[in-house]
Image (spheres, rainbow, N blue to C red):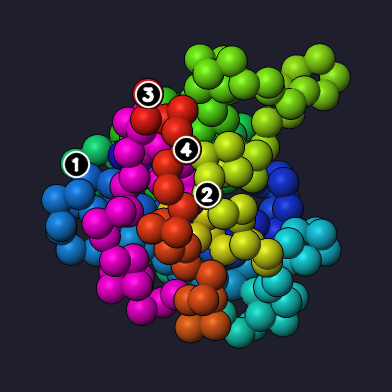
Amino acid sequence: MIVVGIETTGPDPKRNSIISIGSLDTEKLLSDEKEPLFYGECRIRQGAEIEPLALKISSFTEHQIKYQNPESHDELIRRWVFWIKSSKDKTLAGENIGYFGLPFIKYALYSSGYDLDFINKTIGTRSIDIHSLSYAHHQATNTPIPSKYERSALSLDETLVYLNLPKKPSPHNALIEAILKAEAYYRLVFSDSLFSKVSLKNIIPKEFPNKRRKDIPNFNNHPIPQFSNK
């Protein structure tokens, strides 16, 4: 399973662009294989639009995503595809991934020159949604689910708090969010901690910005809630 986090310039895969990808291969991590984590920041895809709110959330500047980031959009996507090739289980996981992450990743591959046959074989259509797992876990533990307009309003931050995990850092970061989602998945499914015996700081990719290393969670400070141990 590959847990994915992305930062974009807006909500629309065709109008907006990926500007950062963070990913974690759980099988590589648990098998102590090389490069279980991936991170990269890129310049905006040519012709894509920028929503000011999206940059505020991620703290990227317009100058940075137009001129400063060392990799182009296509270079980052190709590097991510190369990284994912060695994964034994390429099933993608994330928060609302079918609605947001999967469409963005598929269009990013398509706009970078990959044909639809390659995209369908590499990415596919099935994914694992953290929200769905959290919703089911809330029901199983008889925990009230926040709602709005008579449907679930359960956010990733609420799931993280429910599992005694820190909220997403502000500003957002794609890799840290992928790490938090992966830990949330293991607590929801296995009532266990993925990172209890792994030193994250020893496997963080060199591309990860030094100024964000202080935001890397220490999961030993966040024990699994009692209901998850039942």
Helix or strand or loop: what does disc 4 sit on?
loop
Residue of label 3: 230
Sequence-first disc among 2 and 4: 2
Marks 1/3: CA–CA distance: 31 Å
Residue of label 2: 165
Q: What type is the residue that disc 3 sits on?
A: Lys
Marks 2/1: CA–CA distance: 28 Å
Image quadrant in which the N terminus is located: top left
Q: Nearer the viewer, residue 41 or 28?
A: 28
Q: Nearer the viewer, residue 212 or 104?
A: 212
Sequence-first disc among 2 and 1: 1
Mark 4 residue crowding within 10 angstroms, few (<14) / some (14–19) / many (20+): some
Q: What type is the residue that disc 4 sits on?
A: Pro
Label pair 1/3, CB-CB below 8 angstroms: no
Sequence-first disc among 3 and 4: 4
Magenta span includes 205: yes
Marks 3/2: CA–CA distance: 18 Å
Report whether 46 appears left or right of 73: right
Magenta span includes 77: no
Residue 225, which numbered label?
4
